[in-house]
Amino acid sequence: MIRRIDHIGILVRSLAEALPLYTDRLGFSAEPPVELPEHHMRVQFVGMGNDRIELLQPTSPDSALGRVLATRGEGLLHLCLEVDDIETTLRDLERAGVRLVDDHARMTPHGLAAFLHPESVGGISIELRQARDSQNTTGIPSEAPAASGPSLARLSGRTRVVFTLGYPVAQTLSPAMMTAAFQSSGIDWVYLGWSVPPEGLAVAVEALRANENFAAGNVTAPHKETIIPLLDGLTPDAERVGAVNVILREGARFIGHTTDGHGFVASLREEGMEPRGKGVLILGAGGAAKAVGFALADAGVGEIWIGNRTLARAEAVARLIAEQAGAKAHPAALTEVAALLSRVDLVVNATSVGLQRDASPLFDYGLLRPPLFVTDLVFSPRETPFLRQARAQGCQTMNGLGMLLHQAVLNFVRWTGMEAPVPLMRRFLLEALDERERRGKAV
Ligand code: NAP
């Protein structure tokens, strides 16, 4: 429900050019321009009763306001409305055909906001903001994490740290997602990347042991297996998979755990694919294939085939899954994969082929036809050639972003004992990916 008009603004390309019109010719007095992080530059006019009017200059053509301005030109009226519950309002508006400027609401320096496409709301720019004092039913904070919860100002010597250990880790999407989740839940933790080359891993683990602020950890490539001898134990899940993506701190002990596979199964279910009783073809026999294979076996799939370039690795993984999870698991050479497609419901590409520019297709992707459900664990690019062709031929497809989200959700619950704010985490994950792609294009 719309509660009130927060402010009225006018979107302009250049404050410097527009200001004299309002101050010199119309006689308004203006406060000095304020640069708001990421978002826009603002001049506020005073002496206009209780309401305020702002001139807004987008600081980047990529920001939500920049995109609004690009579609509608100079001098666009901007209305900022406060609503009780932004998620409900957006759902109602979407049903009425209103489009968002971005495909999701986003955190702004003022809190959660969404920008409606002028074309769909009568030609004016409308921003919706979650009212700051509204009952928050979504788990999404009504102000930006920087301004609420355990805010940056409250970071202290007591703040606990979660590190993700990898090499490199510059590309990780997790710090913003996890820190937002901690902050919105009132937990005084931050999440940071720690880039550790292989030869420094043992020293890094020792340093973590000596760090009383260290709360828990994630482990990513290339350390998922090599870290095991440096830990004090493994959960039964990690023991079977032979790889860890999580460090649990239990008193003085560091225990390795794995949530990649169960994150994948949760993401499948979110897309409406229940794996119980299904036939599955997993392409690849590396750590990810193993984690997904075990989790699918736990979820009660009917039969699993492991298809891999190096047949010996497929044989080893299939044997492990059969012996340790009691599933019907078989190895396959890539040349046999085409013949297996008619026997399965789900195809999981757990190879790294989607990351490689010039890799040859694993088999003829033209054979991927409905009703196959086709997934690729890669999420950047968001759609690999494998997924693109499957989708073009009518298959339901899914990339690996949901797996990343849901392993993070499982980690959050395990580390904190609290329910995870899933919509917020998804939003920050998508924003981090958007940002990474923008940076990638800019390089
Ligand atoms: P890995 O242990 O290095 O295994 C890579 C697999 O890909 C092996 O089976 C390898 O076959 C196969 N492969 C690589 N290049 C190939 C090519 N040109 N042709 C045919 N097969 C090829 O890697 P991993 O840790 O399992 O990760 C696999 C993928 O999953 C990566 O792309 C990773 O980014 C993704 N992943 C995603 C998530 C997520 O959260 N979404 C989590 C973990 C991993 P050989 O055995 O013959 O070498």
Image: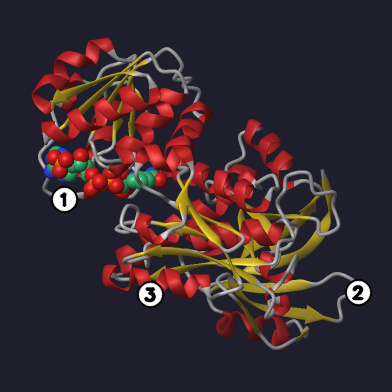
**Is the residue indicated by label 2 positioned so its CB lies within 8 Å of ligand 1?**
no
Q: Is residue 120 visible?
A: yes
- At label 1, which amino acid type do we have? Arg
Camera-nearest label, 1 or 3? 3
The residue carrying pointer 2 sits among few (fewer than 14), some (14 to 19) or many (20 or more) residues within 10 Å by Cα, namely few
Q: Is residue 110 left or right of residue 261?
A: right
Give the Cα distance between marks 2 and 1: 60 Å
For marks 2 and 1 on the same chain, the one whose residue lies earlier in the sequence: 2
Tell me what residue is drawn at x 70 percent, y 48 percent: 418
Q: Quadrant of the N terminus?
A: top right
Q: Is residue 126 visible?
A: no
Q: Which residue is mark 1?
A: 357
- At label 3, which amino acid type do we have? Val
The residue carrying pointer 3 sits among few (fewer than 14), some (14 to 19) or many (20 or more) residues within 10 Å by Cα, namely few
Q: Which residue is mark 2?
A: 49
Can you tell which quarter of the image residue 187 is in? bottom right
The residue carrying pointer 1 sits among few (fewer than 14), some (14 to 19) or many (20 or more) residues within 10 Å by Cα, namely few
For marks 2 and 3 on the same chain, the one whose residue lies earlier in the sequence: 2
Q: Which residue is mark 3?
A: 203
Q: Is residue 357 left or right of residue 431?
A: left
Residue 303 image point, x, y percent: 33, 15
Residue 424 image point, x, y percent: 62, 50
- At label 2, which amino acid type do we have? Gly
